[in-house]
Image (cartoon, rainbow, N blue to C red):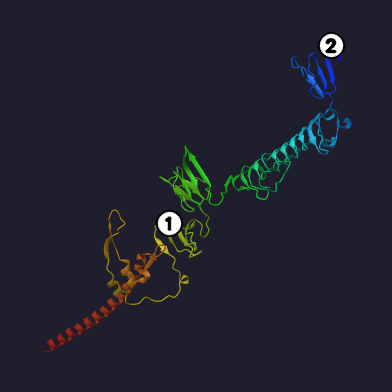
Amino acid sequence: MRTSVLCFPAIIVLTFTMRTSNAQGVMISNDPDAPDPAALLHVYGPENDGGGNVLFQGEFKDSFYQGDPPAEGSGTRFMWYPDKAALRAGQVTGGQWNESQTGEHSVALGYNTTARGEFSLAAGHNTSATGIGAVALGYNTAASIAHSTAMGYQTIASGAYSTAFGSWTVAPSGFETVFGRYNTSYAHSSAPGWVNTDRLFVIGNGTANDSRSDAMVVLKNGRTGIGVSDPQAWLHVNAAADNNALRVQIDGITKLFMTANGGLTAGTLSSAPENGLFVFGEARFNQNVNIGTNATPGATLHVRHANLTNEGIRIQNRGANLRHWTLHTNNGQGTLILYSSISGDTPVGNFNGSTGAYTATSNRHLKGDITAMTDNTLEKLRELAPSRYRYLRDPDEQFTLGFIAEDVLAVFPELVESVGENGENLAINYAGFSVVAIKAIQEQQVMIQKQQETIDKLKFQIAELERIKQLITESR
């Protein structure tokens, strides 16, 4: 059958051929040599400008005037719904494409897809785009709030402007973007808005729904966590057990390395200490370092502390006893006070700020079992042999004067102390010899006093003899 149509006012005549076939369908073409239709409706025009074009034109209507879609309920269909400017193609087994589930200017493609939000797009298998401008692609993905995007496998974007990619990822807060799989859930503050403590960017690396974890989390306030889901610093790294935490390389050479045992190396890579810092090469800072304030440091290492007991620099052994010493500068007298873990809040001693002299605390109330020294100090001193010697560890082989600790231990054990972690060496309290010297002087003074008394007695006896001799001489 051939039909001619005259169109006004442009006075354009369009001639086309429509041929029907009981076996194949309807062919529409402006080519008289068009083949038989290959479908129920076949548009053919490959050799003409715009040949084969198809236009379905309708009118978008306000919600009050919108009619029902061409079909509702389950079915397999390609459907253009001009009242809402909406397009549907694929298959549904329920009411996913009903009027109430069709958003204006929306597109739903695939199987059981829902595009209920205005300007939304849902494609794939069982995807749902219910927010304005939402996009859901893949399998069982859901974009449920304005301008959210969910793509991949069972991803959920429930925050405004949020994006969830990958597998089983969830983006619950506004403007949040998630990649990977099985990221952790958290108590977000706002789904539609921006809250600094909510997440901004997440990479999930969980293995199952009940084993969720995060490889990386960036909060909206800029805090970044690697291996930690709630970063507490601008950069917060939490490595799993037996994993090195940080490595920084320059031109392939490691310059900064935090190992699994807690050690840190700086410079060129070397074996890191246990929970310590190792600086390879020349250990230095190009600028002075200040601790305790942001004021300009006055030395290479400048530590400022409060005027409180045990404030200052502490050196501590991390063994079971946690023994330590603390160096504290007195604000009033300017002395350097020493505290120890044994002394607690009572100073052990201090260095004078003017003379540099060291003095030890010596109050009576700090002491117990006070007894007088024995009176044989001089005899004990005679047993000591002041010596001249050099230390084998001294590369310059310098000589010095002093005692041998084993000799002192035999006569003055109070002045000898075991030193070293295992007490393998002996040390002499040379300052204590001042007390010994005073005691010796006291003993010597008693001896001198007795000798003086004897001398005075002898002088008196001699004087008496001289007087008697004088009287005898005069009597003759």
**Residue in front for this viewpoint, 301 or 198:** 198
How far is disc 2 from disc 1 in space, using C-alphas?
112 Å
Number of on-image labels: 2
Residue 276 drawn at (x, y percent)? 47, 52
In the image, which disc is placed on residue 13? 2
401 in relation to 37, above or below: below
> From this viewpoint, is residue 444 visible?
no
Who's the residue at 28% across and 72% down the image? 383
Q: Position of residue 334 (x, y in %)?
A: 46, 56
Q: Give the foreground label among 2 and 1.
A: 2
Q: Which mark is drawn over residue 15? A: none
Q: Quadrant of the C terminus?
A: bottom left
In the rendered structure, which amino acid carries the disc numbered 2?
Val
Q: Which residue is mark 1?
A: 353
Q: Where does the image place residue 106, in percent across and percent down from the top left?
A: 78, 32
Residue occupying image coordinates x 41% and y 56%:
354
Q: For residue 64, what is the image quadrant?
A: top right
Pointer 1 local density, CA inside 10 Å: few below 14, some 14–19, many at least 20? some
In the picture, the quarter occupied by the N terminus is top right
Mark 2: which secondary structure? Answer: strand
Looking at the image, which is closer to me, 374 or 16? 16
Residues at marks 2 and 1 touching, judged by CB atoms closer than 8 Å: no
Image position of 42 with respect to 238: above or below: above
Considering every residue shown, the one lying at the far front of the view is 23
Q: Identify the image quadrant of residue 172.
A: top right
Asked if 314 appears above or below 404 in the picture, the reply is: above
Task: Specify the amino acid type for callout 1.
Answer: Gly
